[in-house]
Amino acid sequence: MDDRFLLGGVEFGSRLILGTGGASSLQALEQALLAGGAELVTVALRRVDPNTPAGLLDVLERCGVRLLPNTAGCYTAADAVRTAHLARDAFDTDWIKLEVIGDERTLLPDAVELLRAAERLVDDGFTVLPYTTDDPVLARRLADLGCAAVMPAGAPIGSGLGISNPHHIELIREAVRCPVILDAGIGTASDAARAMELGCDAVLLASAVTRAADPVAMATAMRHAVVAGRLAAQAGRIPVRRHALASTPAEGLAAW
Amino acid sequence: MITVVVNDAPRPTRRGETIADLLAVLDVPSRGVAVAVNGEVVRRADWPAHRLLDGDRVEVLTAAQGG
């Protein structure tokens, strides 16, 4: 069965995209990335700080992953566009995980600023992967602008709440032709499997792994969950019934 | 001497110093660095020629865990 995951014209073997935020050390991060088997990994852009341990890019290079810079922390389209251009210069990639946050408490996207930034960055030649709400209409608008994927939140970043509105994730899958990547909210492996069962093409998560008590074990669980969910989504599940349907035939039952 | 502001910290600087000169004396990683001056991105190729002016606000950014 041909089940290639094509994103921005690049083929990936893994449908698990990992974030690097929240890891306790670079060593812990490297072990988790390897265990998860991700081939695309997010990275942020922050002020140079002599107290921050160097070597993040070395770790990512050793893991053989492709970089996905983000615009985390940006609250306006202008800030996000500027950050994307800085990231392109720093990391030699025109791929950008576009985040334009609207609210400090929920860290949910600002739809208006997000659309503005996405339009500008698509025009500027970026491969734009927008972190968006679970609104199917907004997702379609982003896809129509030429975004390479849409990345709806299952729940607020770092909340571990899972997928608050599975129905909307399914509607997004129906509304756009580009890849749908469930981004944010994942708490444990069953959430990732569920995202794939709902028809998502991939899952992006960070905290669920990096802040787990055992990040390597959770990264391994996520790797399997994404594969399991994808297979289940394509396997044609049985319909849900209100009452039992015996799997053992009634014929041939012994009579006493 | 002039004063430029690097990541919010005022820094006395020789007149005529370029972005490349500034980065050479700062403790910055060898790769994965981006620079903006007064809110405008200055591409890496332009660092050797871009001279800093008195009062310039310089942002020097690099890779960090996130996302």
Image (cartoon, helix red, strand yellow):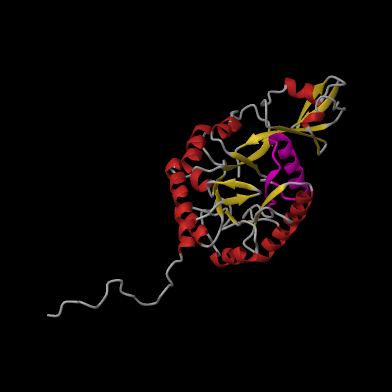
Residue under the image location 59 percent in, 47 percent down: A11
In this view, the residue in front, A204 or B18, is: A204
Judged from this view, the residue extending furthest toward the bottom is: A256
Residue A92, image x and y in percent?
Answer: 70, 36
- Residue B44 lies, with reference to residue A3, above or below; the image says above
Q: Nearer the viewer, residue A102 or A221?
A: A221
Q: Is residue A179 left or right of residue B38?
A: left
In the picture shown, does residue B30 fall above or below B34? Answer: above
Q: Quadrant of residue A247?
A: bottom left
Residue at the farthest front position: A1
Q: Which quadrant of the structure image shows residue A164?
A: bottom right
Q: Horizontally, is A136 left or right of A85 in the view?
A: left
Residue A196 shows up from this direction: yes
Residue found 66% across the figure and 46% down from its top: A72
Residue A7 at x, y = what percent?
Answer: 63, 50
Residue A2 relative to residue A71: left or right: left
Percent across and percent down for residue A65 are: 57, 38
The quarter of the rendered structure image containing the C terminus of chain A is bottom left
Give the number of callouts. Answer: 0
Quick check: A244 above or below A39? Answer: below
Residue A188 visible in the shown view: no
Is A79 magenta? The answer is yes
Asked if the stretch drawn in magenta spans residue B60, the answer is: no
Q: Position of residue B22 (x, y in %)?
A: 77, 23
Going 57% across and 35% down the picture, which residue do you hit? A60
In the image, the segment drawn in magenta is A74-101
Residue in the picture at 81% in, 22% down: B12
